[in-house]
Amino acid sequence: AQSVTQLGSHVSVSEGALVLLRCNYSSSVPPYLFWYVQYPNQGLQLLLKYTTGATLVKGINGFEAEFKKSETSFHLTKPSAHMSDAAEYFCAVSNPYSSASKIIFGSGTRLSIRP
Amino acid sequence: GAGVSQSPSNKVTEKGKDVELRCDPISGHTALYWYRQSLGQGLEFLIYFQGNSAPDKSGLPSDRFSAERTGGSVSTLTIQRTQQEDSAVYLCASSPDILAGAADTQYFGPGTRLTVL
């Protein structure tokens, strides 16, 4: 079975500061990992995903995440926060060996940006 | 547009009534998912359709919930005898290719906000 834990249901940073959203996963097989973002009153959209290859993955809007197998982590970072980054962020994991390919989502982290 | 669409965007109903929520996936996408997002909560998987295979219904919370997908395209989620705890945003997502398996990006609709009074 797979699971995802997002540490911190709410993170607040100042505009221009580093953004760090934490995600740890559990998987019995090498997983695929995703970060999705949900802006207010909208559906989710993909920020970035890791499948194989390079462990540092770059996504849209200046976000990136690093797959660390030894730490079972896939933390999301952005060097400098912008007011428009305020949203809910979801980490997700899937099993690439499963034909059902169901994606398991974490409980989400709400990011607030202080002026 | 070419994205996933859902209707209605908002639905208010009385306890005990039945509701139907509709999802139009992106044309050609073979996989379709329904999720429930309660206030301040994460995404709760409900049901998954993959091509012509039997749907994965393992996430449906009770037998009051059912879903169908006609012609491999449009899907309807039905909730019978609604309860107040059914109030949530119901999200639909589709993805393009079952052969690509778990690497597929899911494309989400804007959701239907259901309020049961």
Image (tube, coloured by chain):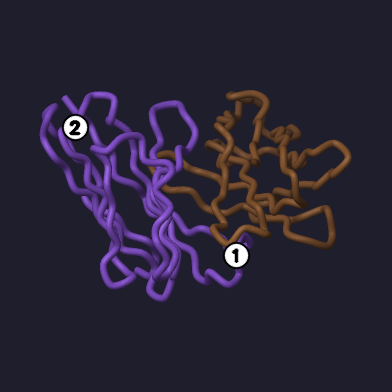
Chain colours: A brown, B purple
Q: In this orientation, which residue lies closer to the viewer: B9 or A1?
A: A1
Q: Position of residue B57 (x, y in %)?
A: 39, 48
Q: Are marks 1 and 2 on the same chain?
A: yes
Q: Position of residue A38 (x, y in %)?
A: 50, 43
Q: Position of residue B56 (x, y in %)?
A: 43, 52
**Residue depicted at x 42% and y 41%:** B59
**Residue depicted at x 73% and y 56%:** A50
In the displayed structure, B16 sits above or below B63; it is above
Mark closer to the chain start, 1 or 2? 2
State which quadrant residue A92 falls in.
top right
Residue type indicated by callout 2: Thr
State which quadrant residue A40 falls in.
top left
Name the image quarter holding the C terminus of chain A: top right
Chain letter for mark 1? B
Residue type indicated by callout 1: Gly
Chain letter for mark 2? B
In the displayed structure, A65 sits above or below A111; it is below
Q: Position of residue A85 (x, y in %)?
A: 59, 40
Q: Which residue was labeled with disc 2?
A: B82
Residue A25 vs residue B57: left or right? right
Name the image quarter holding the N terminus of chain A: top right
Residue A80 vs residue A41: left or right? right
- Check residue B12 in the rendering and tell me which mark sits there, or answer none: none
Q: Which residue was labeled with disc 1?
A: B101
Q: In this orientation, which residue lies closer to the viewer: A62 or A108?
A: A108
